Image (cartoon, grey):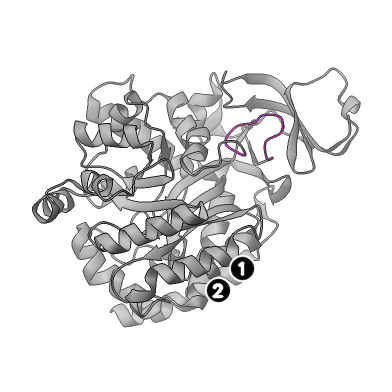
Amino acid sequence: MYLDQLIFNAIIVTVNDRFDIFDDGALGIKDGRIAYVGEKPSNISFFNATEIIDARGGVVLPGLINTHTHLPMTLFRGLADDLPLDQWLNEYIFPSEANHISSETAYWGALLACAEMMLSGTTTCCDGYFYESQVAAAVFQSGMRGVLGHGIVDFPAPGVPDPLKNVQTADQYIKKWDGKTEFIKPSIFCHSPYTCSKDTLKNAKAVAQQTGVLFQIHASETRQEVETCIKRHGFSPIGYLNYIGVLDNQTLLAHCVWIDDADLDIIAKTGAFVSHVPESNMKLGSGTAPVNQMISANIPVGLGTDGCASNNTLDMFRTMNVTAKLHKVCNLDPTVMNAKTILKMATINGAAAIGLKSEIGSLEIGKAADILIIDKRKPHLVPMYSPVSHLVYAVSGADVRHVFIGGQQVVKDRNLLTLDLDEIIEKIIAFAGVISHDTN
């Protein structure tokens, strides 16, 4: 067997249907795809690999999938903390976006996000923002995989000064990027039912259906949002979105904090997916989504970080850790949301939520080689009785040693290979100086 790369001396966590784990495993890559995964053969020269990588007993797992974020918002990390959502959005974030998000800042902010994500083990993200063509260019340059949604709101927005052209602009973006590269999948991102009219939502969904792309939207994030929607439309946000016909198996709902049994039933019956965003929900005081009930209703749920303005970090290992503990304490039950469930949310279930389950999310022959190697030789990771437990409760993004995306190594010994991190940081520091001056 001829391989481009062979990873050996590894604990391999496949996250396949059987959740196979190989304690002394090997993984082979050929033409960007997984060609072998299993126990290490007695003679590794059998594979005739061009490059042999010793994992040094570390854990090999699928690249993590961030199902909800806003990449250029790295520019606003820590800008307006400890505020309720409506005040945070209307008094700080929307004005800052209007004044400081341009094609240039969106590009560099997205590059910073990609650098942070790759170094902490995220290989695929699902984004929604403005100037999304520049965001896509940054993601493509980094080597990451992305489902990237052009933002739509019913007021002047960065790059879309005329809201009457919001859906048209998104359509043009889709046509520009559709089929351009296997690593970038365009999408449409309507901000929410309260910032988009019924006509905007329906028109945007029609474009998503015509082009076959994912339709993303924030929904039922706060109690106030739900109460306002019921007063205005006679439905909860989930009920309203279903009533106007935008929920189906190509819809990704972010947050879903304030939902009831009727909403759960609608989501399950329409086949829509959910992105759980616990750290943002916690920081903004929005509440805790009933993820346990979603899983019981067979609703596929992925994990997301949200943007850095409402979470401050894009580390998906931290998100896994927080998710597991949050739901245990809220349910007063240490058995709910076990480590295996959480890891699946960050990998294979996340892949399903963004329409890429056949390509990524598990280590299986034929799938894209999006792979992490965790350095196990750290004081906080010894001893290791259960690799899955450690991945959720002990590992941090700083423990990621190597990262491969589509077989290309993008992180080697914690060094980025595709981006100039020093240049990116200097650019962001310069932008932040202007933002800070204007804000104060």
Q: Which residue is mark 2?
A: 426
Q: Can the viewer see residue 268?
A: yes
Counting from the top left corner in percent of width and height, residue 268 is at 33, 32
Counting from the top left corner in percent of width and height, residue 317 is at 48, 40
Q: CA distance from mark 2 to mark 1?
A: 6 Å
Q: Are marks 2 and 1 in contact (CB under 8 Å)?
A: yes
Q: Residue at x 60, y 36 (%)?
A: 358
SS of the residue under disc 2:
helix
Q: Which residue is mark 1?
A: 422
Query: Quick check: is 365 in the magenta stretch?
Result: yes
Q: Can the viewer see residue 394?
A: no
Q: Quadrant of the C terminus?
A: bottom left
Determine whether, in the image, residue 402 is placed left or right of residue 302: right
Q: Residue at x 56, y 48 (%)?
A: 124
Counting from the top left corner in percent of width and height, residue 204 is at 38, 60
Q: Which amino acid does the dot numbered 2 rest on?
A: Glu
Q: Which amino acid does the dot numbered 1 rest on?
A: Asp
Tell me which segment is drawn in magenta.
Answer: 359-368
